Image: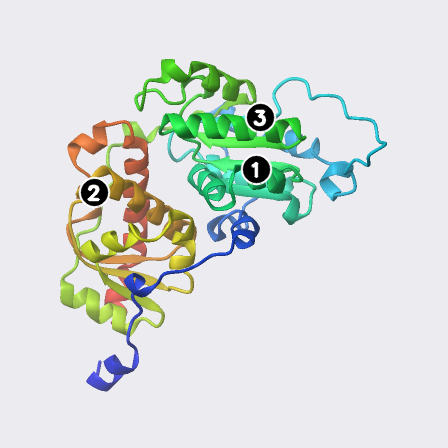
Amino acid sequence: MSTSALTEAVPQSLCAREPHVPADRLVAEMVPPPRFDAVRFDTYIPDPDRPSQSEAVKVLAAFADGLGGAHASGAGKRRWFARKPAAPTGPRGVYLDGGYGVGKTHLLASLWHATPAEPALKAFGTFVELTNLVGALGFQQTVQTLSGHRLLCIDEFELDDPGDTVLVSTLLGKLVDAGVALAATSNTLPGKLGEGRFAAADFLREIQGLSARFRPLRIDGEDYRHRGLPEAPAPYSDEQVTKAAYAKPGASLDDFPHLLEHLARVHPSRYGALTEDVTAVCLTDVTAVPDQSTALRLVVLADRLYDREIPVLASGLPFDRLFSEEMLKGGYRKKYFRAISRLTALARDAKGLVAAA
């Protein structure tokens, strides 16, 4: 590539971006990520040796069919003289539990697509995005905004601290009372939420309250914990990464330690906007993450990059060495394993960038 061509295609920098996302946009963007735009129940291929997978499709399809009616079309808002609807009986949600890689997010997104309601009356987001929404709107405004929805889908349901336990329990309780149906995915059964992360016994009432909101639906399959860490591609040199960033229109190029510092200044609810219109993320000098707060921010960024199918090209350490052994054995290990898996997949997607440079 000529010097003039390199000069003409200067890559972007994520560190130079400080996106400001209006609250109404945060709600409007609560839809299945681009990676799951086209998924449906009939595109999910159950393992014939795992009957629970076929059963999950049947249960969720029936659940979606049962979510039709006036409320779903927006015509069911009660007038002042209307009779108060009967309180819902039994769980008002389904909870997909299973190991990594059994298609839980595929099924959750399929449920969202199959539910007979306008997109504006359905919300889909990760657990982190939901708590970030509360942080952006405030609790009461979040309740008011989501109470008119027919369905709330929560992917990667995790209770990481006591504050989140109380917050989410209270929020979901109010939404169920307002007639909102719930669906969630996680690697932890509802009654076990919070184990290994904080003194769950001190918040047993809140955790049991959450469990009562859902019908657990176990999806069997090979668990990621039995696979070990995915093998990350060997990193490239700084020169290769830089050259690829200049050759790829719309790519970003950042020094990894500087990007980690920048993430601390951007609210996680804005990480999606941070990567808007970026075609590839190129990182130099990838090093081990220094602390848990930084690691958790990186997990959120990895999720947003994966959702948007943005390839990641890097020099320095391979992605399976990002987190210390202590982190991988701690309470947030599931998040770190997920981040490694997703960044590894995106690194594989980025291989063609070097060849094209």
The residue carrying mark 3 is: 173
Q: Residue 275 got which mark?
A: none
Q: Give me the C-alpha separation between circle 3 and circle 2.
A: 39 Å
Q: Residue at x 27, y 55 (%)?
A: 262
**CA gap, disc 1 to disc 3?**
13 Å
> Residue 257: which quarter of the image?
bottom left
Q: Of the residues under marks 2 and 1, which one precedes in the sequence?
A: 1
State the separation of the CA atoms marked 2 and 1. Answer: 41 Å
Please identify the quarter of the rendering in which residue 250 is found: bottom left
The numbered mark at residue 140 is 1
Please rate how many residues cluster around mark 1, counting C-alpha atoms within 10 Å: few if below 14, some from 14 to 19, many from 20. few
Horizontal side, residue 95 vs residue 279: left or right: right
Classify mark 3: residues with Cα within 10 Å, few (<14), some (14-19) or many (20+). Answer: some
Q: Is residue 134 visible?
A: yes
| Image marks 1 and 3: residues in contact by CB distance under 8 Å | no
Q: Amino acid at mark 2?
A: Asp
Q: Is residue 239 depicted above or below 134 in this figure?
A: below
Residue 148 percent location from the top left of the image? 67, 40
Residue furthest bottom in the image: 4
Q: Position of residue 205 (x, y in %)?
A: 47, 14
